[in-house]
Amino acid sequence: MIYRAVHLLNVIRINRQLFLVAVLFILFFQLIPVVSASDDQMMEYFYEYGCSNCAQVVPVIDEVVGQYGNITLEKYEISTDYNGTTGYARMKVYGAYSVPAVVINRQITILYSDYNGNKSLLRELLISGIENAPRMIQNNSNQTIQDTDPLPELSFFMVLIAGFLAGFNPCLIAVMTFLATITLSSQGGRKDMLIMVIGFCTGIFIVFMLGGLFLLGVVRQHPRITDSITLFLVLLIGIMGLWHLYDAYHLSKHDRSSFKTPDSFKRLMSAIEGNAMEGKNILIVSCIAGGVFSLVKAPCVGAVYFAIIDLIISQGNIAKGGVYLALYNFGVVFPVLVLGVLLAYGMNPEKVTEFREKRRVEVRIITGIVLIALALLIYFKVI
């Protein structure tokens, strides 16, 4: 009896051990899919049509993703709409504002500035990000992506300074002084002078605003031509910079600018002079003069404007870029408004002309260098 009891206890003990092993074995295989599911990772790649840097990193990304079997790769073109949200809006949620950009598990962001075109370094960053990425927060998978503050890389201060740079231009000051001289030499007083200044600035503002909104509208309707427009603007800015440097040399040698004023604009100035003498239609005629000036003197004033437009285009959110255009255009006309008020209240136009003639070579050189630097920085996607 004792032997049978001991044998029975041994059998029960062995069966219990086998049962525990079986339970642990079952639990182990049940936990495997849970662990693998928790190890699943997501990589989001943001790019833009025509972006050469984006095209260069795609093979590296595909190669690294192919080495792992648990990575979901999602690609977003920044100007394309995905279920009511643009790729650019998605990218901004992660604090990225330029392409190419890679986000791992919605927490690790790799920007072009992190590797500067070095593919080996990019590969190392991707592998390190995948292997060390925190677990993806699942409750953010359906997060609502809201549009944040537009164009954070462009500050109000930067746009205003660019506008002031264009506003304090010898060409603009020359025409402004000419108009002031006409008004003050006629029977017109301070009121006529202020009306003329407001009209001239309004004309400049309207033409620049319409031109910028037209370019931004074209890019919004046809996002694939963004790269072509960017290249065109970069070339235009660079050419204008070289032209300003040449004009500085031309001024120093011949004491006259290489920027020619069309005869049609001279006739318009004569028409303004006639109307000012008669004291009629000053507002309308000066407004037209400001608009025409914006067109015929674009090489003098508009190059920095093209740089601002290119920055807006390259950073996306085209629909809200008009706010920055308006701010820039206000910066352009603000020096003219200040000069007009000073002239109306006693400043001698001859002193303004004397200052312009004395410093115009230096202004041309500084403007040319700034424009060439802008063209290079935009081309190499530094800004």
Image: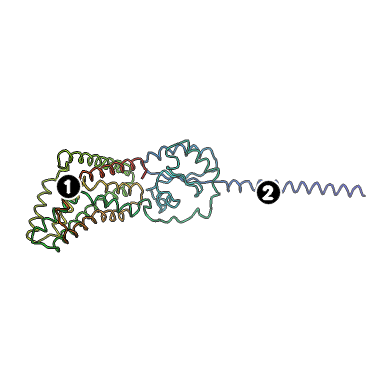
Q: In x, y percent, where is residue 153?
A: 37, 50
Can you identify the residue that label 1 sits on? 357
Horizontal side, residue 55 vs residue 186: left or right: right
Within 10 angstroms of label 2, few (less than 14), some, or many (20 or more) residues?
few
Q: In x, y percent, where is residue 27?
A: 68, 48
Check disc 1 and give the amino acid type: Glu
Within 10 angstroms of label 1, few (less than 14), some, or many (20 or more) residues?
some
Q: Residue furthest right?
A: 1
When asked about the image quadrant of residue 113, the answer is: top left
Q: CA distance from mark 2 to mark 1?
A: 89 Å
Check disc 2 and give the amino acid type: Leu
Coloration mode: rainbow
Can you identify the residue that label 2 sits on? 27
Q: Residue furthest top?
A: 120
Determine the secondary structure under disc 1.
Answer: helix
Determine the secondary structure under disc 2.
Answer: helix
Pick the residue in front: 241 or 115. 241
Q: Residue furthest bottom?
A: 191
When asked about the image quadrant of residue 247, the answer is: top left
Q: In x, y percent, where is residue 167?
A: 23, 52
Mark 2 and mark 1 lie on one chain; the one further toward the N terminus is 2
Pick the residue in front: 218 or 362. 362
Residue 140 vertical placement versus 32 (above, below):
below
Residue at point 29%, 56% (across, down): 327
